[in-house]
Amino acid sequence: MNFETQAIRTQLSNASQKEHSAPVYLTSSFTFDNAEEARAKFNDEIPGNIYSRYSNPNTDEFIQKLCLLEGAEDGLATATGMSAMFTSMAGLLQHGDHVLASRALFGSTHQLFTKVFPKWGIEHSYFNLHRPEKWESLITPKTKMIFVETPSNPGLDIVDLEYLGQLAEKHNLILNVDNCFATPYLQNPIEWGAHIVTHSATKFIDGQGRTLGGAIVGKKDLIEELRFFARHTGPSLSPFNAWVLSKSLETLAVRMEKHCENAFKIASYLEGHEELELVKYPFLESHPQCELAKKQMKHGGAIVTFIVKGGLERGVRFLDSLNMLSLTPNLGDTRTTVTHPASTTHSKLTEEERASVGIAPGLVRISVGLENVNDILGDIEQALQASKEKTVNPRIENLIKV
Ligand SMILES: *Cc1c(COP(=O)(O)O)cnc(C)c1O
């Protein structure tokens, strides 16, 4: 079956009421017919649900579907993206191990590497995304895992997954890819040699800004180890959220098509705009890694970044001038959302540190939603004009037609 069909037709199959849509199993535990069944299930002699911290029909449906879409052997669902990142590492690493990671990481993942794992003697080195020829030299006898995000946030740099897959194989390392920005519709890291793929399902998988969720999929033996860890540490996804996320996967393909179409139109329109210094989007010919992006991604994704002329202050004025676009840290929503990393998510870094991960003072990140593209562009254009002046006039009218 094809991607869309798998996403829609993978479903729980017991239908006591002949329901067409999967029901929600909001139950913390499951019953046994007799003591012998309880014993056998607890000893993994027969399959079946015991307790929703271990498994639940709704989380199973969600994860089975995601495994099909990622081409993975097995997986487990988690309550948030961060619990997926944490579990995927804490469950496999031990004191003395070392992780090679790209510096351009989601903020909380960076905190894991710098503040949490060192407490347990797990170390890391960051590689520079722009110097792939140096990556191999950072591998030590203690290195056990490579962890990356691609495209990176908010720099939109592309990491060469095929190269990393080969590097991991050569040094017998686990390649763990956070595929949150691309989703399985745009990119399947397992095809290039990843052993584990991690997700924040909060973003495009839900796609409508409603629930938190996460997932880890990959090689059966690794997932087995992680399942033990998760069963006893408890990052489990709620059945209700799993039901929401499984339903969301049914529309992932059509949503991603539209997200990417809108994002490409916006990036193309903005490129060369007199109020901007730079527009970045993986499928724009001007992106230094456009060819690589096209090799490993189906479309360029939903995130567009640009640098407004006038630095930090202009960036702030631009955000204050928007009428429709939402100022919110989330991304991957039906609604277009905007952030200004230098004054928010990355404000604690020095300007130099920000520059090293591609964050200029005037950098604006847009997660392009599913509204009509002309309305999105209209709001961006009027805010660019309004933010030129020191005093903001949010009512300036300047509608664009694409
Ligand atoms: C949001 C995000 C996470 C964390 O996910 P939560 O669901 O918020 O815990 C991890 N990685 C990336 C790339 C993200 O964008």
Image (tube, rainbow, N blue to C red):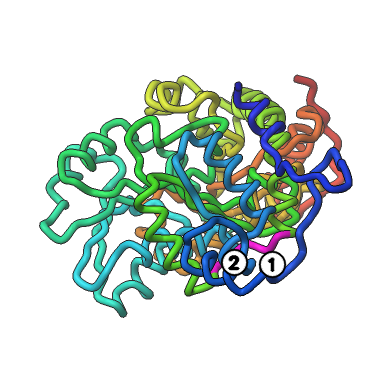
Q: Quadrant of the N terminus?
A: top right
Location of residue 60 in the rendering, given as x and y in whole percent from the top left corner: 61, 51
Image quarter of residue 391: bottom right
Q: Quadrant of the C terminus?
A: top right
| Tag 2 and tag 1, C-beta contact below 8 Å | yes
Does residue 138 appear to the left or right of 112 in the view shown? Answer: left
Judge whether residue 109 can be spotted in this image: yes
- 74 or 383, which is in the foreground? 74
Location of residue 30 in the rendering, given as x and y in whole percent from the top left corner: 69, 67
Query: Helix, strand, or loop for circle 1?
Result: loop
Mark 2 crowd level (few <14, some 14–19, many ≥20, 10 Å Cα): some
Residue type for callout 2: Glu
Mark 1 crowd level (few <14, some 14–19, many ≥20, 10 Å Cα): few
Which of the four quarters of the rendered structure image does ligand 1 lie in? Answer: bottom right
Magenta residues, start to end: 235-239
Residue type for callout 1: Asp
Residue to which mark 1 is pinned: 33
Judge whether residue 336 can be spotted in this image: no
Query: Helix, strand, or loop for circle 2?
Result: helix
Q: Which mark is residue 37?
A: 2
- 345 or 219, which is in the foreground? 219
Q: Is mark 2 within 8 Å of ligand 1?
A: no
**Where is 193 relative to 123, above or below?**
above
Does residue 214 appear to the left or right of 217 in the view shown? Answer: right
**Where is 272 relative to 320, above or below?**
above
At 59% across and 54% down in the image, what residue appears?
Answer: 340
Marks 2 and 1, how far apart in space? 6 Å
